Image (spheres, grey):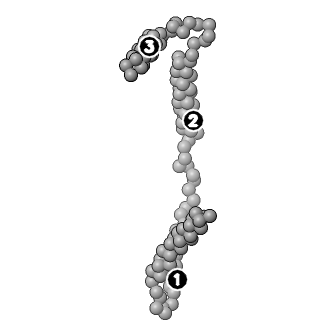
Amino acid sequence: MQFRVKALVLMLALAVALALPAAPALAQQAPSLGAPQQTETAPQPVTTAASSGGGGLKTWQEILIFGAGVVLLAGIAIAIISDARERAPAPEGELATVGPHRHRRESKERGRARARAARRARRRNR
């Protein structure tokens, strides 16, 4: 219960502390000393002749840009799919040692065997 009271007091003190810096900021405005307020008049906007709107891309340019985007996305998709097919696990009917990455599996197995032997040796030497 005391924790809640302390937390409430702390939150109240934080709120008061955050509210105080706003008061001096309001006092920093320049006083008018009884002089009438001056209203600023905005200059009239300059009107220009209406443009024909011909500054955009032409149709063939838009087609070229979208075509390049499609070719780029297709290339990325092909790269991802081909890489995924290379790294896909072998079907269950094939042997695990057949394939282009056989040497990696064998070296992993040798490393695991060495690690097991090292663990056994450490246990014996305790």
Q: Between tags 1 and 2, which lies in front?
A: 1
Q: CA distance from mark 3 to mark 2?
A: 55 Å
Task: Specify whether 74 is left or right of 117.
Answer: right
Q: Quadrant of the N terminus?
A: bottom right
**x and y, in percent, of residue 69 in the image:** 55, 33
Pointer 3 residue: 113
Pointer 1 residue: 39
In the image, residue 100 sits, relative to residue 61, either above or below, namely above
Residue for point 53% across, 71% down: 13
Q: Amino acid at mark 3?
A: Ala
Pointer 2 residue: 66
Q: Between tags 1 and 3, which lies in front?
A: 3
In the image, residue 2 sits, relative to residue 111, either above or below, namely below
**x and y, in percent, of residue 99 in the image:** 51, 9
Q: Amino acid at mark 1?
A: Thr
Between 38 and 78, which is closer to the camera in this rendering? 78
